[in-house]
Image: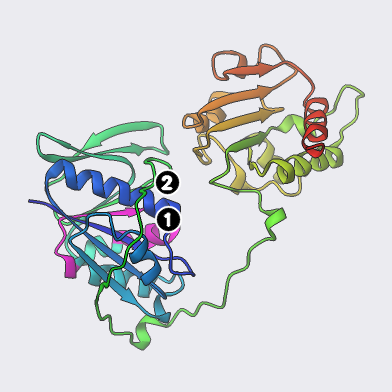
Amino acid sequence: MDNILFLAHTEADGTLNKTALEALSSAVELKQALNGTLDVALYGAQIQPAANSIAACGATRFLAVCGESFADARFATDAAASEALVRASGATIVIAAATSRNARVMAAVAHRVGGCVDTHVTDVTAVSGTPTVTRWFYRQRIEGSLTRTQRPWILLLDPGSRPAWKGEPGSITPQMIDVPIGDSLLRTSVKGLVTPPADQQTIRPDADLLFVAGAGWTKKQKDGQTHVPEAETIIVEFLRSSKASLGGSKSLVDISGENQSTLHFMTHLNQVGQTGSSPRHPKGLAACCHGEEPHTVGWRFIGERRAINLDPNCGWARGKADVLYVADAFEVMSKVNALLSAK
């Protein structure tokens, strides 16, 4: 019988983020499918709020590593805490969210406990009583299913793959696991976090809408001139009013390296596509990009796809968009901004 462990780090306020709750949902479902047991393991500066929030998840045991040394993301302390929790649980399958913090350490944890790890997991099921995962390969271009016999098997679940777990909060007292903190674990010091102001944040994974800008915003318009400053104003105003997340085509984010005028807030972190990210938003709107395959491959998880382009024969018109608006994006988005500001 498999013992499944849900492993998560807590946030600064001691809670669990959405991606962690998605991983918990998968762990609960796998426990039911395998008729196994479920343990919960948490680590961070605070763990009690998180433990209480998921008290009704059906876990047999709650384990925790707690202390200020585990407050911030640091390889040495995160790996030590995760290793101790996996060993204490005796888990055969470990499910964790693919956060940057987890992804940084789980391969090392798997090596230390003599197990194996799989990343980019999107589903975990039981086939004839055998745990089987579905995951992406080659930058999410190939999907495959597999199972492994090596244990413990650590799985990192991609964000947005499963619905977040929901349940009534309760009261639980986790079993504390002691992790000795020596100087070797504290050689890296965390000085703090630097984040942009909320109104300058352009990457919003939980936004309902993804707005993707293409290189057309920086090209000559119908008057024969470029209007990059105007494009920046229109896009920033739309992002501020709609709270959408911003993406960019590869051609647009590459322009800055070619000494051409570009949107100053657009970086390679915003890139969506074959060599960028594959976000998971309910809706997507692309403007001034042509819908080439390398770009639209990143849209495979977007629920409803719409595009604005002056070319009625662009790639978006070839079955890649649910709706294509053949129009000038400058005019359309200016009108949209006026409508949003009137609300």
Residue 173 position (above or below residue 208):
below
Graded by Cα atoms within 10 Å as few (under 14), some (14 to 19) or many (20 or more), the crowding at tag 1 reads some
Left/right placement of residue 45 relative to residue 134 reads right
**How many marks do you count on the picture?**
2
Point 33% across, 85% down: residue: 181
Name the spot of residue 226 as percent of width and height, x first. 87, 33
Q: Which residue is mark 1?
A: 99
- Observer able to see residue 7: yes
Left/right placement of residue 294 relative to residue 33 reads right
In the rendered image, which quarter is residue 81 located in? bottom left
Quadrant of the drawing holding the C terminus: top right
Point 24% across, 34% down: residue: 145
Name the spot of residue 52 as percent of width and height, x first. 34, 65
* Amino acid type indicated by mark 1: Thr
Tag 1's secondary structure? Answer: loop
Between residue 76 and residue 202, name the one nearer to us. 202
Point 82% across, 28% down: residue: 335
Name the spot of residue 316 as percent of width and height, x first. 61, 19
Tag 2's secondary structure? Answer: loop
Disc on res. 159: 2
Name the spot of residue 134 as percent of width and height, x first. 28, 37
Q: Is mark 2 in CB contact (under 8 Å) with mark 1?
A: yes
Left/right placement of residue 256 relative to residue 152 reads right
Q: Is residue 104 part of the magenta span, yes or no?
A: yes
Graded by Cα atoms within 10 Å as few (under 14), some (14 to 19) or many (20 or more), the crowding at tag 2 reads many
Distance Cα–Cα, label 2 vs label 1: 8 Å
* Amino acid type indicated by mark 2: Pro
Residue 83 position (above or below residue 216):
below
Between residue 26 and residue 251, name the one nearer to us. 26
Residues in magenta?
87-107
Point 10% across, 39% down: residue: 129
